[in-house]
Image (tube, rainbow, N blue to C red):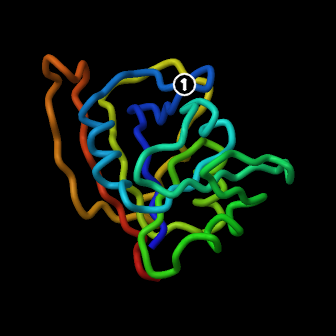
Amino acid sequence: MITIIAAIANNNALGKNNDLIWHLPADLKRFKELTTSHHIIMGRKTYESIGKTLLNRTTIIVSANKNYLKEDCFTANNLEDAIKISPPNEEVFIVGGAQIYKYAIENNLVDSLDITLVHHEFDADVYFPEIDLEIWEEVKRNDFKADEKNKFDYSFIKYIKKAN
């Protein structure tokens, strides 16, 4: 099972200047809960924006640079090879960035989407691909109102690929 996990805004904004645009502690907590003890796949820019290996996760970095190596991480030169490194019978999470998300969806490499939808529009320089509801079925949604810790209303939404 290959799952994309992402936090996106109403206008599909993902980030700006290689960083997150908003701070939503509930999303960070959910990300940690879902990805802990799993393999996570990310592009080099995403890895470098995080700046470290995330605890209790096996990190696979996708980089076209064949000499790119980071301690305590696996590297792959493309997304297909990154998936091959992952355990075949476990859930694997693709955690970014925008180019990796786009490639994974366009090349039919993903089984599900775990999306945090931030109910706001932001100025961004990277965007998540449009979620095509002809392909993806929403199977679970939890809606939350802004509070003292989370500045924006948000929803956790699970999509699975529709059967052909």
The residue under label 1 is which amino acid type?
Answer: Asp
Q: Where 119 falls versus 39 (above or below)?
A: above
The residue drawn where x is 64% and y is 33% is 48
| Residue at x 24%, y 18% (from the top left corner) | 151
Q: Vertically, is 94 above or below 129?
A: below
Drawn side of residue 106 relative to residue 13, left or right: right
Q: Residues within 10 Å of mark 1 (few under 14, many from 20)?
A: some
Q: Which residue occupies 40% across, 23% down?
A: 121
Q: Is residue 131 above or below residue 123?
A: below
Q: Position of residue 118 (x, y in %)?
A: 33, 32
Return the residue found at the far front: 71
Q: Which quarter of the figure has residue 75?
A: bottom right
The image shows residue 8, relative to residue 75, as above or below, that is above
Name which quarter of the figure residue 9 lies in: top left
Residue placed under numbered mark 1 in the picture: 19
Residue that appears at 65% across and 58% down: 74
Task: Determine the secondary structure under disc 1.
Answer: loop
x and y percentages locating residue 106 in the rendered image: 64, 61
- Residue 41: image location, x then y, percent: 57, 55
